[in-house]
Image: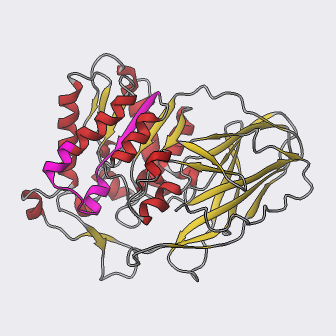
Amino acid sequence: MTLADADPAAPVPAAGALPHSGLDQAEVRGAIVVERTERGLLPRRLGPREWKQIPDDFMLASVSQSAGIRLAFRTTATVIELGVLATKMIESETAPMPDAHYELVVDGELVQTRASAAGNRFVFTFERPEAYIVPGEPDTLRFDGLAAVDKEVELWLPYTDEVELLDLRADAPIEPPTPATGLRWLHHGSSISHGYIASRTSNTWPVAAARASGTELTSVAYSGNALLDPLTARTMRDAPADVVSVKIGINIVNGDMMRLRIFRTAVHGFLDLIRDGHPTEPLIVISPIFCAPVEESAGPTVQDPTRTDTWTIASGTPEQVAEGKLSLSVIRAELERIVRERAVDDANLHYLDGLRLYGPEEAERWPLPDNLHPGDDVNALIAERFVRHVFGPSGLLQLRGSVGGFVGG
């Protein structure tokens, strides 16, 4: 099943009187594949073979969402309209549909944002065994008041929704974009990389880092599903990239998914699969950022039943860690050890301690709103530090071909 299977006969939204249609002239960036549907185009962030192996509806919803995906094109238009049919993961058929934000970037500058609450419902909760789709309506996002000059345009899709692209119209011709020249950065991570509680796509740390560094991001960050799945590693193996990064750990502890013995071999297998397709490209292993509940205690993480707000706590104990369960401190130590051992034969394998991006001192100053996920302020901090440690003048990429680099705690 796909989230876009709700109603293949859904009408394409009216796009006013704009005379120029250009969806096929635009370039979809940040997708692994782009499917042509009866209505338009559907960007995907997982390989087609791997799509068939998605194990449950939660991962289906997560990989379907449009984190890091954008349309790129050139135009002199003053008005641009994008027709979409979104699908939103939501807990019931009657819950209010949340806004999703579409962001227009002109010549590298974010100039306009439009919100939409329309679309299909992908009704899902962890208590319900099977998700289902309730068909909804398409929508048109209108961006106007633009300067009538030749410009490079990027339209970033909301990281919260699956988005089927139905039409792209303007009051001037839409042309293919100038070819991208930045490094192709392929990144995998959890909801912290996907976005989750960031206010919009541009405020998620990988997108902010990519825009600041001039890199071309492809995000295979899957909320709740950074679990060292072979299907994810194969997708990364087969995707073009100049630099690859993997942020590993928090979801494994969140769900109490592994013990130390299995974690060690799973990390090796995940890196081996990526290296099958990217044998010499810089590969950066990033350990978890600070998360107080599971720094020394085992997962799984749960919601605090004594509070009315969303607040994450650990249900495991430090004693269980001594018995082989995982905490974030154990994962950091294991990842650094594994990278050091592998870097003897792999000079382009690097380690970045997540505490260098957000550690206990930062947690005192910028607490996580739900004790687990960063808000916009911490996303910006992580992006700035990642760019400095990886892409900066003294960053890990400057070590290419010499020796494995380590940015430790």
Visual colour scheme: secondary structure
The percent coordinates of residue 201 (x first, y second) are 57, 53
Q: Residue furthest top?
A: 402
Q: Is residue 291 above or below residue 380?
A: below
Q: Is residue 199 left or right of residue 14?
A: left
The percent coordinates of residue 59 (x first, y second) are 42, 60
The percent coordinates of residue 105 (x first, y second) are 69, 44
**Quadrant of residue 388 in the image?**
top left
Q: Is residue 124 visible?
A: yes
Q: Who's the residue at 78% across and 61% down the image? A: 12
The percent coordinates of residue 113 (x first, y second) are 69, 55
In the depicted view, which residue is nearer to us: 317 or 244?
Answer: 244
Q: Is residue 69 above or below residue 337?
A: below
**Quadrant of residue 259 in the image?**
bottom left
Q: Who's the residue at 38% across and 33% down the image? A: 389
Q: Is residue 249 above or below residue 121?
A: above
In the depicted view, which residue is nearer to us: 140 or 393?
Answer: 140
Q: Is residue 325 left or right of residue 42?
A: left
Count of all numbered marks drawn on residues in the image: 0
| Magenta extent | 242-265
Asked if residue 32 is among those painted magenta in the image, a careful observer would answer no
Q: Is residue 196 visible?
A: no
Asked if residue 243 is among those painted magenta in the image, a careful observer would answer yes
Q: Who's the residue at 72% across and 33% down the image? A: 177
Quadrant (top left/top right/bottom left/bottom right) for the C terminus = top left
